[in-house]
Image (spheres, rainbow, N blue to C red):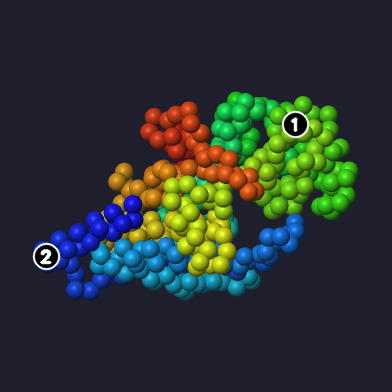
Amino acid sequence: MIVRTLVKLTLVWQALAMTGTVAAESQQIKIAYFSQEQAAPPALSNLDPFIKDKGIPGAELAVADNNTTGQFTGQSYQLDKFSVAINGDVVQAFKEKIAGHYAFVVVDLPADQLNRISAIASSEQLLLLDIATTDDSLRNEQCAGQVLHLLPSRAMRADALAQYMMKKRWQKWFLVIGPTSEDRLYAAAIKRSAKRFGMKIVAEKVWTHTYDARRTAQSDIPVFTQDVDYDILAVADEQGLFGEYLAYRTWSPRPVIGTQGLIATTWHKTHEHWGAVQIQKRFKELAGRWMEERDYGAYLAVRAIGEAATRTQSNQLEPIKAYLFSPAFALQGYKGKPLSFRTWNGQLRQPVLLAAPRSMVAVAPIEGFLHPKTELDTLGFDEPESHCTRH
């Protein structure tokens, strides 16, 4: 596939050269990577080290791929990285370093910070590519016309799990919700998906117990999950404070899904189909570790810009942005289907991986779930359900 693509690009380049349409100097496309340093979150164990540079290696790998293509199309790509200190002023840094200097910005920030800079960016000529958030509100009531979202939303992840549960006919769910606001948002997505696909939440409890593993395993979890008849235990614990304790410790022997157990994710180290082994290997050689979700999001963001720039033969915002939203745009993401952006809310439509810690279980949309336009739109908020008014 890659060899055929390079051959085609070579022929295009030669044809352009013969007609004299190749510019003497390459077009430069400058991309900013804007982030803020994050404090290490509380860890369940020391098995998973805190990774400070999530996202950046993915963007760097994509720039290298873009520049490989650019050798044939007369374009070059430059990635400039900007990181704000933990206690720094994100808005001020954005005004000084980004606004007015870059048209394309990969944004690695939490939802509240993304909202703040998107309010500034609305009057600027730039495009923000969000690689960090999963908030459904940013794709609905708080959507912004200058923001594209690369990671699947919570609703897309919950729908992917619900489709698989429906296939397995595991219809009675016991929902356990953590103490944080993010946990409540994830739980809301789970409830929406359960209703959407005809599942029944037979019990719902908020976790208020200790996070001490020995006490939790020996006493809290069996009592906490007792006296409920259910098929699966759905857990909403985005910080990973207690969810890993649940498997094999519940009163009844039941599978765990959600933020732990069987998870819905955009990328996973066990994913090997559709050429994924190739990019997994290349990323590991570059970064010395496995690719994480944010790395994959950054890779897709930069590659999307490169794809649009190649097809439009432009380095300007308007033609590139128009192509990103056109029916012609198709981005290869190592998932078996071309990826594209939803015009109504800027969300990247894509398959969602369902993975256990050491194995790939399924890929959603699950076979049999149909849609009049694309099965990918069976995941998350479809256009008739959208509350986004970006247009």
In this rendering, the answer to whether 54 lies above or below 378 is below
Q: State whether residue 258 is above or below residue 151.
A: above
> In this view of the protein, which residue sits in the foreground, 128 or 168?
168
Which element carries disc 1, helix, strand or loop?
Answer: strand
Residue 305 image offset from top left, x and y in percent: 37, 59
Measured as percent of width and height from the top left, residue 359 is found at: 60, 46
Circle 2: element type = helix
Looking at the image, is mark 2 or mark 1 nearer the viewer?
Answer: 2
From the viewer's perspective, tell me whether residue 165 is left or right of residue 330.
right
Residue 166, how many percent across, how many down?
59, 28
* Tag 2: amino acid: Met
* Percent coordinates x, y for residue 295 in the rendering: 52, 60
Q: Position of 66 compared to 314: left or right? A: right
Which mark, by number, is residue 268?
none
As measured in the structure, the alpha-carbon distance from the residue carrying label 2 to the one carrying label 1 is 70 Å
Which numbered tag is attached to residue 203? Answer: 1
Camera sees residue 58 = no
Q: Label 1: few (<14), some or many (≥20) within 10 Å?
A: some
Q: Earlier in the sequence, mark 2 or mark 1?
A: 2
Q: Is residue 40 above or below residue 336?
A: below
Q: What amino acid is found at the position of numbered circle 1 in the picture?
A: Ala
Q: Residues within 10 Å of mark 2 (few under 14, many from 20)?
A: few
Q: On the image, numbered disc 2 is attached to which residue?
A: 18
Task: Please state the total of marks drawn on the protein image.
Answer: 2
Q: Residue at x 74, y 52 (%)?
A: 241
At 75% from the left and 31% from the top, the residue drawn is 203
